Image: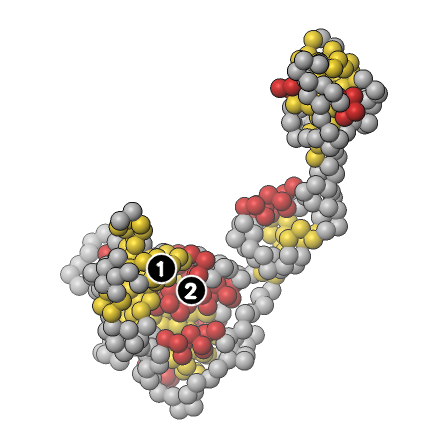
């Protein structure tokens, strides 16, 4: 499948690496890529949480499929209770006790009632339930102190779901309530779209995996693979971490080729700039059939982000600094993957709040600003985190981020901004 059908190709011909574009331009490119239709698969309902339905689902049964009681009480014929009051008790004959799960055996006649538990089936001829609170049972006689109208506390057949109706539509994300309604219809399996497959690679000679206990001078633990893996999973995609790749031309080339055989999208971090040891661009330039769409976006942090297409597959290379890698992921890739998998977009996890303290920003670069939310004058407000992308703790102390436009240099206290929560 061609991931870039209908895609805006800006400056593609002879485009060289390191032609910086704006955030808007990059977003336009990503937004113009249509949502893919992935193949579907049938899975157990119990495993379907957060998956996307690939077909409308109809019910083969009414839910409930029998009339049942909403309360513990006495099933009656409504007319028999008319006039009942605390000082005018009406006496009925108790003919049966029906617990949840029981099949009623006796039909009511005038002047009779049956005990019904919550969820129990209503006996034939009954058209209402009097709550236990308004009754007084003496052996096989029940005294009613409240009149009820027809239909009181009876859940009618098909009240929740009608046989043959579409219960849930195609493209719906399966949440807990959806699992509940499907379970009520006796549905055991559901057809869902397969997840987009994303490969993840970390690059850098300095990176080591957490299995190694001894941290030598110059070495650091790989952060991006752990953080990005979870970030990608949160978009509804399936992630394969292919490991840490050394800054070696052949190793990186092999890893990229392997990733593209196994997935639709590759996300790689580290090695994006043209400095020594930064092999990403070099390897990509040499791959046949490569189409370079983006290398460099006017964003802070994270300028040297790369986006290319190869053999109908897409490759994103994010800057190595964990804060830059994650901010680029949020600004560009998060919504892109959410659209691919059919997940709700990031906007759902955002809110407009007031700025609690003046925030400065560099003109000429769109800024991803980590912020914390604090109470000020009894109101929740946005405050900037003072450290930058060099500090891993920047994100740790933040609750979310705001985006500051390329041409803005100051956001005044009191202005309103949309915060996207982590
Ligand atoms: P690079 O983009 O490869 O030049 O890396 C920029 C900085 O980010 C360097 O200090 C790297 O050590 C660091 N870095 C790169 N990848 C990772 C990673 N996966 N985990 C933690 N730090 C990283
Ligand atoms: Mg590196």
Nearer mark to the viewer, of 2 and 1: 1
Residue 410 vertical position relative to residue 283 in the rendered view, above or below? above
The residue that mark 1 highlights is: 419
Q: Which mark is residue 334?
A: 2
Q: Residue at x 45, y 65 (%)?
A: 335
Image quadrant holding the N terminus, namely bottom right
The picture quadrant where one finds residue 92 is: top right
Residue 147: % across, % down: 71, 23
Between 138 and 332, which is closer to the camera in this rendering?
138
Element under label 2? helix
Left or right: residue 307 compared with residue 108: left
Q: Residues within 10 Å of mark 1 (few under 14, many from 20)?
A: many
Q: Residue at x 69, y 23 (%)?
A: 130
Q: Which mark is residue 86?
A: none
Ligand 1 under 8 Å from disc 2 Cβ = no
Indicate which disc, 2 or 1, sits on the residue closer to the N terminus.
2
Between 45 and 82, which is closer to the camera in this rendering?
82
């Amino acid at each position: 499948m061609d991931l870039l059908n209908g895609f805006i190709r800006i400056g593609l011909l002879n485009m060289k690496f390191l032609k910086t574009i704006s955030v808007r331009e990059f977003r336009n490119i990503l937004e113009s890529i249509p949502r893919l239709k992935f193949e579907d698969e049938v899975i157990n309902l119990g495993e379907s949480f957060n998956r996307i339905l690939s077909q409308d689902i109809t019910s083969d049964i009414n839910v409930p499929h029998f009339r049942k009681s909403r309360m513990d009480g006495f099933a009656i014929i409504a007319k028999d209770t008319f006039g009942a009051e605390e000082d005018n008790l009406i006496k009925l004959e108790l003919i049966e006790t029906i617990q949840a799960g029981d099949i009623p055996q006796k039909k009511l006649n005038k002047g009779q009632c049956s005990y019904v538990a919550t969820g129990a089936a209503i006996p034939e001829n009954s058209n209402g339930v009097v709550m236990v609170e308004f009754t007084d049972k003496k052996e096989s006689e029940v005294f009613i102190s409240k009149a009820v109208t027809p239909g009181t506390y009876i859940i009618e057949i098909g009240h929740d779901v009608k046989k043959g109706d579409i219960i849930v539509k195609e493209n719906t994300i399966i949440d807990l309530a959806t699992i509940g309604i499907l379970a009520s219809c006796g549905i055991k399996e559901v057809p869902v779209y397969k997840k987009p497959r994303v490969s993840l690679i970390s690059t850098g000679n300095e990176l080591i995996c957490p299995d190694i206990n001894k941290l030598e001078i110059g070495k650091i633990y790989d952060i991006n693979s752990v953080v990005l893996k979870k970030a990608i999973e949160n978009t509804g995609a399936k992630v394969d971490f292919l490991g840490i790749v050394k800054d070696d031309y052949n190793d990186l080339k092999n890893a990229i080729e392997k990733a593209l055989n196994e997935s639709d999208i590759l996300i790689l971090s580290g090695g994006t700039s043209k400095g020594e040891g930064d092999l990403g661009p070099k390897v990509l330039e040499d791959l046949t059939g490569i189409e370079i769409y983006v290398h460099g976006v006017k964003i802070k942090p994270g300028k040297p982000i790369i986006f290319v297409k190869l053999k109908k597959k897409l490759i994103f290379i994010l800057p190595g600094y964990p804060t830059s890698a994650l901010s680029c992921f949020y600004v560009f890739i998060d919504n892109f993957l959410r659209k691919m998998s059919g997940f709700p977009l990031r906007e759902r996890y955002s809110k407009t709040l007031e700025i609690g303290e003046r925030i400065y920003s560099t003109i000429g670069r769109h800024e991803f600003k980590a912020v914390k939310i604090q109470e000020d004058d009894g109101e929740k407000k946005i405050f900037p985190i003072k450290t930058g992308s060099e500090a891993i703790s920047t994100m740790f102390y933040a609750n979310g981020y705001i985006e500051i436009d390329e041409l803005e240099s100051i956001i005044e206290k009191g202005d309103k901004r949309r915060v996207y929560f982590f």
